[in-house]
Image (tube, helix red, strand yellow):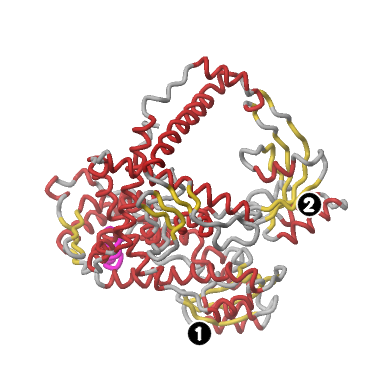
């Protein structure tokens, strides 16, 4: 336990995470650009050089600081603090709000079958929080709030929480989903359309192409000849899959979803050019009542609105970044690039490494650009990042717009922080509360370590005794050879199970219907699987005999039909292979026992009052309720 870094252990307890999500929101914006390098912005048009350069920057040293923070920014921690929320428990003079119990449960996305199960999950989370509060009380008594390691780490993390506050106040809090928009989406929610397109630079050419198509010229031939979208032109302009409402950019979406199968549409203009469209196929998912899909639609719309608002905020930040390029240093960069380009032959838009080692030390510290209040970017940092970026994604220093965008991306962290400070978000009660929560979580961890340190010794005799007493606990689980058809809705899975049970070859169904990537061609053969990898599938497989078909097996928004081919029984493990696991288990048990004894002793000095009626709030009939129970 003592070997785990404190900042990591602080995130592993109580079900809460204290790494802010706001910075992840900004970085997600950059990451989405990287993804669009592959997805081609849904409509298949190659990114502009600027966007391509930004996307590449994510993979380069220019954004290493931001990416390191992105790795820490976890979902579920961007809820707004509710100062007026109901109190579910009191621990001495401290309180626990109901949101502290429910937020981590909601963020886990676990579905509970009964009100009793949901109440049990809440009670378990509340127990963790009570324990943490008592540990924090003990930590303050030992002056852990002044511990130099904790103080330094809190100071190190401040900016992350500040950017989280910026993201929530300037992006999330400014987004709302109108009811009429949800209803408008519902009209098309179950429709799926597979289009193909030809995109060209001018309406005149688009009109000419439409006239040729109407006279009988093959769409695919014209796409290969004229389309600017080289990612789809080679397959006749086909975008390659069905799209649901909301995936395509608005001008194209309105036209495409109004077309019948085989019908032509356009020309229609987007930011990428003029599009001529044709619907390859249409389908309709099984319809469901509005109330059952309303939340799903709201979430999709909100995601789009958040992206739009985030980009607007960043565009405003970019406009006010006050980027000043030092032309004499930029000239050095351009000369270095041109000199290397003169010696090698590369495809257009591809750039070789630049010779950093040839720069004198004085040149490495030369300032290429300034930005914001007092931000500076050195020649050395630019070259290091340039060389660490993929060759076909590097900025062209000869183009001013790409140089400015590079500087903006390199300075984005500082610009965001300066904006937050300018809005006085460091004085926000929410920011201060979350920073204090983070500090106290680390204090609780240090206290937890102090309570159990040097009391966790376990010898080999104890390990052997535990192994001999629990033979069924040390088995390699049974494995099952399965075929699977994964689909996106339960009715389709039910139909496939019935077809397979009435004689349709399962492999044929898999080749036709499965949406699991890479498994169409082999007939849905998952090979040998165990509960470690596919617990839900294995649970159903365990009820089948070889040759039988089962399901639907629910997953995360999808459903599986399976067929069991063979079964391998569980196999006992050797003692030597289990020693480490047993040692850790016994240590955990002993540590939990010691910690529980400490918590019980603290409850004597700091009484715990749990409000059962609040704990059960908004849980449907069947859950326990009550008030004022001591714990």
- Per the picture, the main secondary structure of the magenta-coloured stretch is helix
Indicate whether 445 appears above or below 264. Answer: above
x then y, percent, for residue 365: 15, 50
Q: Which mark is residue 96?
A: none
The 10 Å Cα crowd at callout 1, few under 14, some 14 to 19, many 20 or more, is few
Q: Residue at x 18, y 57 (%)?
A: 332
Image spot of residue 389 (x, y percent)? 35, 51
Residues shaded magenta: 396-410
SS for callout 2: helix
Residue at image position (38%, 40%) is 602
Which residue is at the front of the view, 574 or 322?
574
Which class describes the residues within 10 Å of circle 2: few (<14), some (14-19), or many (20+)?
Answer: some
Q: Nearer the viewer, mark 1 or mark 2?
A: 2
Eyeballing the image, is 618 above or below 271? above
Mark 1 sits on what residue?
A: 204
Q: Verify CB contact (< 8 Å) between mark 1 and mark 2.
A: no
N-terminal label among 1 and 2 = 1
Quickly name the residue at label 2.
Answer: 508
Residue at (24, 46) in percent of width and height: 355
Quarter of the image for residue 6 reads top left
């Amino acid at each position: 336990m003592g070997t785990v870094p404190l900042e990591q252990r602080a995130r592993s307890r109580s079900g809460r995470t204290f790494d802010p999500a706001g910075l992840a929101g900004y970085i997600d914006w950059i990451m989405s650009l990287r993804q669009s390098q592959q997805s081609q912005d849904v409509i298949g048009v190659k990114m502009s050089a600027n966007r391509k350069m930004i996307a590449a920057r994510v993979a380069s040293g220019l954004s290493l600081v931001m990416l390191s923070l992105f790795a820490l920014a976890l979902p579920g921690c961007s809820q707004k603090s509710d100062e007026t929320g109901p109190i579910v428990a009191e621990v001495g003079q401290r309180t626990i709000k109901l949101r502290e119990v429910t937020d981590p449960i909601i963020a886990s996305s676990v579905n509970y079958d009964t009100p009793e199960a949901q109440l049990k999950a809440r009670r378990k989370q509340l127990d963790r929080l009570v324990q943490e509060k008592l540990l924090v009380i003990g930590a303050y008594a030992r002056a852990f709030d002044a511990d130099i390691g904790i103080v330094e780490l809190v100071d190190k993390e401040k900016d992350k929480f500040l950017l989280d506050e910026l993201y929530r106040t300037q992006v999330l809090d400014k987004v709302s989903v109108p009811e009429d928009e949800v209803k408008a989406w519902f009209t098309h929610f179950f429709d799926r359309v597979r289009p193909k397109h030809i995109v060209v630079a001018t309406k005149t050419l688009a009109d000419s192409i439409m006239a040729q198509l109407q006279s009988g010229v093959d769409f695919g031939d014209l796409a290969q000849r004229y389309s600017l979208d080289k990612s789809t032109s080679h397959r006749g302009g086909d975008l390659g899959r069905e799209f649901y409402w909301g995936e395509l950019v608005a001008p194209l979406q309105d036209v495409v979803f109004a077309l019948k199968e085989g019908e032509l549409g356009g020309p229609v203009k987007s930011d990428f050019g003029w599009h001529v469209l044709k619907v390859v196929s249409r389908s309709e998912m099984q319809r469901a009542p509005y109330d059952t899909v309303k939340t799903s639609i709201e979430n999709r719309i909100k995601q789009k609105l958040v992206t739009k608002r985030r980009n607007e905020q960043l565009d405003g930040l970019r406009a006010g970044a006050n980027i000043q390029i030092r032309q004499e240093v930029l000239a050095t960069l351009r000369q270095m690039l041109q000199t290397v380009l003169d010696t090698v032959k590369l495809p257009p838009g591809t750039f070789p490494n630049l010779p950093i080692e040839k720069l004198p030390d004085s040149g490495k510290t030369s300032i290429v650009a300034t930005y914001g209040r007092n931000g500076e970017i050195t020649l050395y940092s630019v070259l290091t990042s340039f060389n660490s970026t993929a060759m076909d994604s590097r900025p062209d220093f000869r183009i001013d717009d790409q140089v400015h965008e590079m500087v903006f991306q390199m300075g984005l962290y500082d610009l965001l922080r300066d904006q937050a400070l300018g809005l006085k978000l460091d004085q926000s009660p929410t920011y201060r509360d979350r920073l204090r929560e983070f500090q106290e979580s680390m204090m609780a961890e240090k206290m937890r370590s102090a309570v159990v340190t040097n009391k966790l010794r376990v010898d080999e005799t104890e390990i052997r005794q535990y192994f001999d007493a629990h033979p069924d606990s040390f088995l390699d689980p049974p494995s099952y050879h399965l075929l699977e058809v994964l689909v996106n809705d339960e009715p389709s899975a039910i139909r496939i199970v019935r077809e397979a049970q009435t004689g349709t070859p399962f492999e044929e169904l898999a080749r036709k219907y499965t949406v699991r990537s890479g498994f169409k061609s082999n007939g849905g053969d998952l090979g040998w699987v165990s509960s470690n990898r596919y617990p839900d599938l294995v649970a159903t497989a365990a009820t089948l005999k070889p040759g039988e078909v089962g399901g639907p097996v629910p997953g995360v928004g999808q459903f599986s039909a399976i067929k069991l081919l063979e079964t391998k029984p569980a196999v006992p493990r050797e003692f030597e292979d289990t020693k480490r696991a047993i040692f850790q288990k016994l240590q955990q048990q002993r540590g939990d026992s010691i910690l529980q004894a400490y918590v019980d002793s603290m409850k004597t000095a700091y009484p715990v009052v749990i409000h059962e009626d609040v704990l059960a709030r908004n849980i449907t009939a069947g859950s326990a309720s009550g008030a004022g129970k001591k714990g």
